[in-house]
Image (cartoon, grey):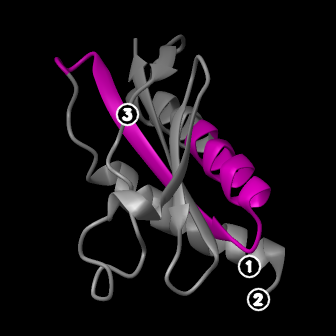
Amino acid sequence: MTRAATFALLAVLVTSVWAEAPAAEDDNCQVISATHSAETKGEALIMSRALAAQSVIRLKKTKGWGQAAVSAQKVKPDPFWKSVRKAMPEVSIYGTFVTPKTYTVCFTGVVVAYVCTSGSKVCR
């Protein structure tokens, strides 16, 4: 699968994850989550963060929020193959990476080598 096709497919998956994201403390905040898988650790990390940033933009547009504060939010790692790996064993997690805007947990995948899930809290 080409990188563009993979990116488009994952954008659809992120949208479905974002729609089911748990509510934050009030209606002025929302938690988003984005997951990306790749053959390299770096690509999985960079792309999960990029998909989270796209979800923030989409959320602001959907909610009509001109300005929004974005902060890192720990979210549950989201493996794609839940029928194969129902729970995320601690030994599968190889890294946690936190920036001011994303909290990312990376783990080894079942079908693809590496997977990262990034979370952000968006408040207007």
Mark 3 vs mark 1, CA separation in Å: 28 Å
Q: Say left or right for 4 vs 98.
A: right
Image vertical order of residue 96 relative to residue 99, above or below: below
Image vertical order of residue 43 relative to residue 27, above or below: below
Image vertical order of residue 47 relative to residue 54, above or below: below
Mark 2 vs mark 3, CA separation in Å: 30 Å
- Amino acid type at mark 3: Lys
Between 42 and 69, the residue placed more toward the observer is 42
- Amino acid type at mark 1: Ala
**What residue is drawn where x is 81% and y is 74%?**
3
Mark 1 lies on a secondary structure that is helix
N-term-proximal mark, 3 vs 1 = 1
Q: Which mark is residue 5?
A: 1
Residue 63: which quarter of the image? Answer: top left
Q: Which mark is residue 80?
A: none
Mark 3 lies on a secondary structure that is loop
Between 49 and 9, the residue placed more toward the observer is 49
Quadrant where the C terminus is found in the figure: top left
* Circles 1 and 2: CB atoms closer than 8 Å: yes
Residue 108: which quarter of the image? Answer: bottom right
Asked whether residue 40 is drawn in magenta, I would say: yes
Residue 74 location (% of width, % of height):
37, 33
Look at the image and give the residue range highlighted in magenta: 25-53
Please name the residue that numbered disc 3 is placed on: 74
* Circles 2 and 3: CB atoms closer than 8 Å: no
Please name the residue that numbered disc 2 is placed on: 1
Between 43 and 1, the residue placed more toward the observer is 43
